[in-house]
Amino acid sequence: MAIDRELEDRWELWRECLTGDDPNSIFQQIYQMTWDAAIFRMIIESRQILIEQNPDEPTINANLHSFIDRNFFQAQVARIRRFYDNKRLNAKWGVYSLRSLIKDMYKYRNKLTREVYFHLREIPYDFTAIQEREKRFLEQVKGEAFIVPCELNWECSEEAHKIFDRLSGTTHPDRTPQDVIENKVFDRLQKNLDSCKDVAKYVDNYVAHSATPQSRVSNKEKDTKITWKSIWDNHQSIYEVANFLSEFLYAEDQIPLAWERPSIFNYWDAPMVDSASMPQIKIAWENFREETETWRLNTGKSIWQWIEG
């Protein structure tokens, strides 16, 4: 069959966006997001253990843990905002985001027919002939140990038809090669992602930009409180939408936290430094404080040199 070359290129672009090796591809971002979240949850559990051991005066440095919490929080909300980015997928300033991917797929939905989908997946549309060949093969090897050859695997075609039935709102007897995905599929995926909207607004006002109170009021922005639960919920929504697309488009199921670095628990029970090293830590603090003091003392001199130099 003749197929639109632009759609073939788009199919590969969607693959690169979703599961490519580029560090900004969607699943590369998801893997890093969930890995960081796993580390942070271990930190929270470690902190809770210290609190339970000595509720009145736990051996926790409040400044260090506040630093960890603040930076993890800002990194996570910024990453969630990236998945919700609304820029085009392949423009001059294009981005890899779930929102841009869904919008781009919707743009080509009428070209992505059932027949074209099977062609892009490189699987047979009509699998009845393969079923018959498998039947003859099984009759020949009856009573023997055997492995069914890959070319006789008709189940993947049957499963693909069932998936497209659900996406196109079609039943088996009414299937046609021209079936297309229903609008509501894209609407539902977008609605699922809209759970990230509050985080995205927060990032725009407090992380990526420092919006003034007046600008927040003029844009009718409410100061929504972002909780840890909302971040975990956003993680789940992002993964579910991305994995749905990966399974539908490329029959690939992605595991969000599939690997464990061998060093993950190394020295987790060791203090950062011992008490004998604290003078050196304090010197590092004082050295930086003195460095910042030179900023203050040299401010007038430096600025006047810029202006009059």
Image: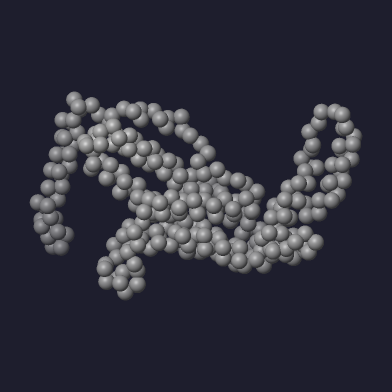
- The quarter of the picture where the N terminus appears is bottom right
**Residue lying at 73% horizontally and 47% vertically, measured from the top left:** 156
> Which of the 4 image quadrants contains residue 78?
bottom left
**Is 45 above or below relative to 211?**
above
**Is 213 above or below relative to 300?**
below
- The image position of residue 260, as x and y in percent, is 48, 34
- The image position of residue 21, as x and y in percent, is 53, 46
In this rendering, would 20 be left or right of 289? Answer: right
Instruction: Tell which residue pokes out farthest to the top in this image.
Output: 276
Q: Nearer the viewer, residue 66 or 49?
A: 49
- The quarter of the picture where the C terminus appears is bottom left
Instruction: Tell which residue pokes out farthest to the bottom in this image.
Output: 218
* Numbered-mark total: 0
Q: Nearer the viewer, residue 266 or 49?
A: 49
Look at the image and tell me whether residue 134 can be seen.
yes
**Residue lying at 34% horizontally and 59% vertically, measured from the top left:** 225
- What kind of colouring is applied to the model shown? one colour
**Residue lying at 90% horizontally and 36% vertically, measured from the top left:** 139
- The image position of residue 141, as x and y in percent, is 87, 32
> Which of the 4 image quadrants contains residue 281?
top left
- The image position of residue 264, as x and y in percent, is 42, 32
In this rendering, would 56 be left or right of 183? Answer: left
> Which of the 4 image quadrants contains residue 110?
bottom right
Look at the image and tell me whether residue 95 can be seen.
no
